[in-house]
């Protein structure tokens, strides 16, 4: 553009022209040397731009691959976890309807118990999914009330005993444990999730131990089972969303979300959670939750 007051330099990248730089030379014409220098400079700028564009594209691709992985893990987990109990419920109902009078009372009771159990499993599963999306979306407003851990544990244990009446739960709660700051309902959900896992991943006849103690200014909650335990290199990974130990018992339905939710709740209350295994005689898993106690007024 010979009549323009600016001189324009395209920023060329292998993807095409990424921009144009206009330079106003002032009175004197640019010397050949100055031109060469500007051109060299523009080359550098183009290369830098190209790198930035590529890095952005790579980051986008990574994010969408992760999102994709998450979505497909969620989908396969949901379809399995929703379908299994649903088909069992539908099967039981169909049998009840078609055989009706021909059925003995114990068989009928058995089918009804099965429907009840599978329906409550479904309901736990959906509740877990909802919790997770709420925690992730920041929709859960965590209360910051003083919470009596002993009370909350007692409530969760009561619920667990109703849910699994045949299982033994041994509790050991230190007297007068000071309160922690947080949300009683969410803490109860955390404890219940740990009890759920302890029961899912240990033999029916083995007991589950729950304890609450005060140690060095912290309130410590432990839930231990006598199941096969967790390998050393899985102890952290089990807190990842959708992570389930491969070759685990394989039959227990689950989403791999329970412990991610537990960690979300513990962290939101200023605490932490980790897993230990083995507990004794090369067996067992112990989940340990620590909370700072509320500072005295
Ligand atoms: P889910 O139980 O739905 O699979 P969790 O996030 O609660 O999801 O647990 C993740 C994985 O950690 C489980 O699939 C299981 O393999 C392992 N796990 C959790 N708790 C225990 C336990 N008490 N004993 C053995 N394995 C466990």
Image: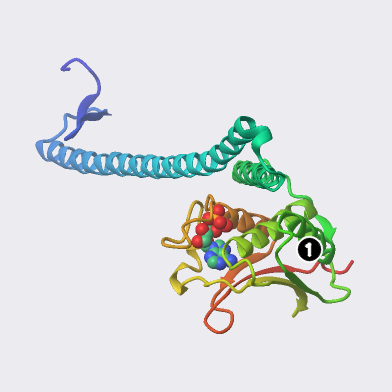
Q: Quadrant of ligand 1?
A: bottom right
Q: Residue at x 88, y 74 (%)?
A: 176
Q: Residues within 10 Å of mark 1 (few under 14, many from 20)?
A: many
Quarter of the image that includes the C terminus: bottom right
Quarter of the image that includes the N terminus: top left
264 relative to 72, above or below: below
Report whether 244 appears left or right of 155: left
Which picture quadrant has residue 52? top left
- Residue lying farthest to the top in this orientation: 3
**What secondary structure is found at the residue carrying circle 1?**
helix
Give the image location of residue 39, x and y in percent.
16, 37
Give the image location of residue 27, x and y in percent.
23, 27
Report whether 55 appears left or right of 179: left
Report whether 6 appears left or right of 108: left
Q: Residue at x 67, y 55 (%)?
A: 265
Q: Is residue 181 visible?
A: yes
The residue wearing badge 1 is: 153
- Residue lying farthest to the front in this orientation: 102
Q: Residue at x 56, y 41 (%)?
A: 88
Q: Nearer the viewer, residue 170 or 289?
A: 170
Q: How many marks?
A: 1
90 relative to 249, above or below: above
- Residue lying farthest to the left in this orientation: 32
């Amino acid at each position: 553009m010979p009549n323009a007051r600016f001189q324009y330099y395209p920023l060329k990248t292998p993807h095409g022209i990424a921009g144009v730089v206009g330079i106003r030379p002032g009175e004197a014409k640019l010397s050949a040397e100055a031109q060469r220098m500007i051109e060299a400079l523009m080359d550098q700028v183009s290369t830098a731009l190209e790198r930035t564009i590529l890095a952005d594209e790579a980051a986008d691709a990574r994010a969408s691959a992760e999102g994709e992985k998450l979505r497909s893990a969620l989908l396969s987990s949901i379809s399995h976890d929703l379908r299994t109990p649903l088909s069992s419920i539908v099967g039981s109902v169909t049998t009840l309807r078609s055989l009706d009078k021909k059925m003995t009372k114990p068989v009928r009771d058995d089918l009804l118990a099965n429907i009840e159990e599978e329906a409550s499993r479904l309901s736990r599963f959906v509740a877990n999914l909802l919790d997770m999306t709420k925690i992730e979306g920041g929709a859960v407003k965590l209360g910051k009330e003083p919470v009596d851990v002993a009370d909350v544990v007692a409530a969760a244990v009561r619920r667990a005993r109703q849910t699994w009446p045949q299982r033994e739960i041994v509790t050991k709660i230190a007297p007068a444990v000071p309160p922690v700051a947080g949300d009683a309902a969410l803490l109860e959900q955390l404890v219940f999730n740990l009890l759920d896992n302890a029961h899912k991943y240990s033999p029916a006849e083995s007991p589950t131990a729950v304890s609450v103690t005060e140690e060095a200014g912290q309130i410590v909650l432990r839930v231990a089972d006598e199941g096969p335990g967790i390998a050393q290199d899985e102890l952290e990974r089990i807190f990842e969303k959708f992570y389930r130990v491969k070759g685990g018992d394989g039959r227990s339905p689950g989403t791999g979300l329970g412990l991610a939710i537990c960690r979300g709740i513990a962290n939101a209350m200023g605490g932490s959670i980790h897993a230990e295994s083995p507990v004794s005689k090369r067996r067992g898993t112990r989940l340990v939750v620590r909370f700072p106690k509320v500072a005295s007024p």
